[in-house]
Amino acid sequence: MLICSIASAIFPAHAGNNPADPSKVVRAVLEAADDGFDPVRTVNVYSNWIAEAISERLLTYDYLARPAKLVPGTAEAMPEVSDGGKTYVFHIKKGIYFAPDPAFKGVRRELTAQDYAYTFKRFLDPKNRSPSANVLQGKIVGMDELIAKAQKTGRFDYDAPLAGLQTPDRYTLRIVLNAPDYNFLYLMGFTAFGAQAREVVDTYGDQSGAHPVGTGAYMLQKYVPRSKIVLVANPEYRGYTWDFKSSGSAWDDQLVHDMKGKKMPQVGRVEISIIEEEQSRWLAFQGQQIDLDYLPQAAAPTVLDGKKLKQSFVDQGIRLNTVAEPGVVYTFLNFKDPVIGGSSLEKNALRRAIAMSYNVQDEISQARLGLAVKAEMPIPEGVEGHDPNYRSSIAYDPALANKLLDRFGYKRGADGYRTLPDGQPLTLKIATEASAISVVFSEIWKRGLDKIGIRADFRVSNFADNLKAATECKLMMWNGSWTADYPEGDDFMQLLYGPNVGQGNNGCYSSPAFDALYVKAKAMPPGPERNQLYIEMSRQMEADTAWVLTVQRLRNWLIRPWIKGFKRHPILQADWQYLDVEKH
C-alpha cells in the first residue's frame, strides 16, 4: 500500500518559517520495519524514530550535552514544580503550528496546551490498548476514575474535567500527580508524547498511524510500508539557530565550527530505506546510496584497524563516531509459556539450564565481531542505576546445566535429546528473523542447546510481526533489545514489572518479590538507596531466570563527508534536524 501526504500541495507554505533547503537530502536507513507512526499504538523503535521527527514533546534533550540533559522543547522553560513534586505547570510557546493537513480544513492550526492533554488521554483510553499506557497509568489525579468509567460505558470522555490535567488558558498545562514521581520530567521528554491534534485522529481513525501530523521539523510525504519512507520539511516549522555548546571533545569542537549560527533545519528532505539484511545495507553505503549508518558487524574487519578507520576509508573522507549504546540485548523466556514458564522449581531449573547453555562470548566474537561488551545487569552503562562492579550470577556452563536438568527429571532419550519430567517432548520454539546476524544467533543457541540435550525449533518471521506476537505473550523465546527512552534505570526495570505485561514486559515475567522492590524504588528519588534496590531487582530476575542477558552494543557510525553536524545522541534518534548537507 502506497500512502502519500499531499498536504503541501493543497495548502500554501507560510514563507519565512522553515529554512530547510529542498535540495539538501539525507539518505538514511532503518534495519527493520516500522508498524505505523501512531506512538499510542506501538513501541516499535523504528516507528518512534520517525514519529520523533514529526511531533514535538514539551521537553527534549540538548543535542551535544553528555550525559543527556533535558531542555525545553515546545515549553517556554522548564516547568514550575510545586506541592512537593506533585504539581507541574508548563507554559507552551506561542506561534507553533501543526503541519498543513486536510484534517484542518484549510485553517492554520496552532499548538495549544489542550493538544498535550488530549495526547496523554489517548494513551490511557482503554479502547486504544496502548502498549505504553503503563508510563502514565496511576499517575494523574482523577484519571483512574475516568478510565474506570470508560471501561464500564465503552467510551472515554475526552471532554470531562480532570483535576490532574488542566488547561487554565490556551498555552498553560497544569499536571497534578497522585504522588511525587522523580522520573516525571524524563517522561515529558519521552518520544511517544509528541503532541497530537484531535482533529487528525478523528479524521483518520484507525489509519492515524499512516497519517502522522505534528509540529516538528518534518512531515510525512511518502510511505511504502516495509520499504520506503520520505520526510520533507514542514513548512509551518518555526526553525531555530544552531547554538549548542561543545563538551570539550575534538568531535564537538568540529561540530560547533561547522554548524554554529546556522538557521535550522538545513535538510529539506529525508529519504529512509528499510533494509533488514546487513550485507545489503553495507553495499548501499559503499555505493553511496545512503549517507550514514552504523557499521555492520560483518564489515568491521574490512573497515576498522583496531578502533580506527582503515586508511582507504579515511581517504574517502568518511568519519567514525563510536558510541556505547545505552541499551541491552537479551533473550526473554516467556513466563506464561506452558513449557518453560511458571515459578515451580522444575521450570526454573529448565530456564536456568537454557540460560547457562548460551555462550555470550561467542556472540561477541562471532555475531558482533568484537563490537559489544558482556551485559552484567539489566541497566546498561551510561544510565543512572548501572553498577560497574555488578556481575551476573548466571554464567555459560553446559556441564552444570546438564546436572541441573538431570536432577529435575529432564531425561535424555536414545537420540540424546531430553523430555519433560512427565515424558512429554521438549522442544524450544525460538522466534527469530532472516538477517545474517540472526542466523549466527541461532547457530550459537543450537550449539549450546545440543550440549545440554534440548531440541530447538527456530521460527523465522520479521521484526514487526515478532514484536506484535511478543506483546501478546505468544512467543516462547525471542532475542530482543531495549535502548533507553530516558537515562534512568526505571526505564529498564519497568520491562520486568508484572503489571506491564503487554506493555513492554514481553517476556510476561511476573514475580511478587520483584514487583514489591519495583514499587519501593519508584517512590524513591535517584540515588544510592534506589540504586541498591535496582541491584536487588537484578538478582531477583536472575533467580527466576526471566532473561538471558547478553550484551551492550558498541555502535560505530560511519558518516559521509558531506554530512555535517552528526553526533549520535543516547536518547534522540531522529537527528536530521540538527544536520547539514554540503552539496557535492
Image (spheres, rainbow, N blue to C red):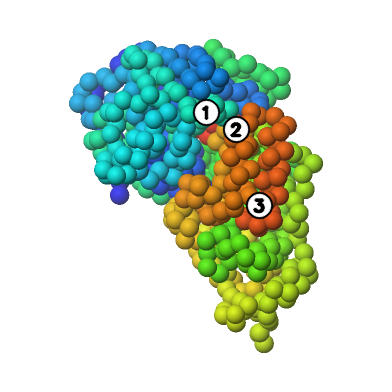
Q: Earlier in the sequence, mark 2 or mark 1?
A: 1
Kindly report the distance in space between the C-alpha atoms of the residues bearing marks 2 and 3.
Answer: 20 Å
Residue at x 65%, y 64% (from the top left corner):
348
Residue contact at pointers 3 and 1, CB within 8 angstroms: no
Q: Position of residue 271 (x, y in %)?
A: 43, 37
* Amino acid type, label 1: Ala
Residue at x 66%, y 29% (from the top left corner):
526
Q: Quadrant of residue 157?
A: top left
In the image, taking residue 218 as reference, residue 328 lies left or right, namely right
Q: Residue 179 — which label?
A: 1
**Few, some or many C-alpha atoms within 10 Å of disc 2 (few <14, some 14-19, many ≥20)?**
few
Q: Position of residue 372 (x, y in %)?
A: 70, 47
- Residue topped by disc 2: 523
Q: Position of residue 327 (x, y in %)?
A: 62, 42
Q: Earlier in the sequence, mark 3 or mark 1?
A: 1
Q: At numbered mark 1, what does the secondary structure look like: helix, strand or loop?
A: loop
Q: Quadrant of residue 16?
A: top left
Q: Which of the two discs, 3 and 1, sits closer to the camera? A: 1
Residue at x 68%, y 34% (from the top left corner):
530
* Amino acid type, label 2: Ala
Q: Position of residue 346 (x, y in %)?
A: 65, 69
Kindly report the distance in space between the C-alpha atoms of the residues bearing marks 2 and 1.
Answer: 8 Å
- Residue topped by disc 3: 541
User: Is residue 159 visible in the rendered structure shown here?
Assistant: yes
Residue 469, relative to residue 584: is it above or below?
A: below
Residue contact at pointers 2 and 1, CB within 8 angstroms: yes
User: Is residue 209 visible in the rendered structure shown here?
Assistant: no
**Few, some or many C-alpha atoms within 10 Å of disc 3 (few <14, some 14-19, many ≥20)?**
many
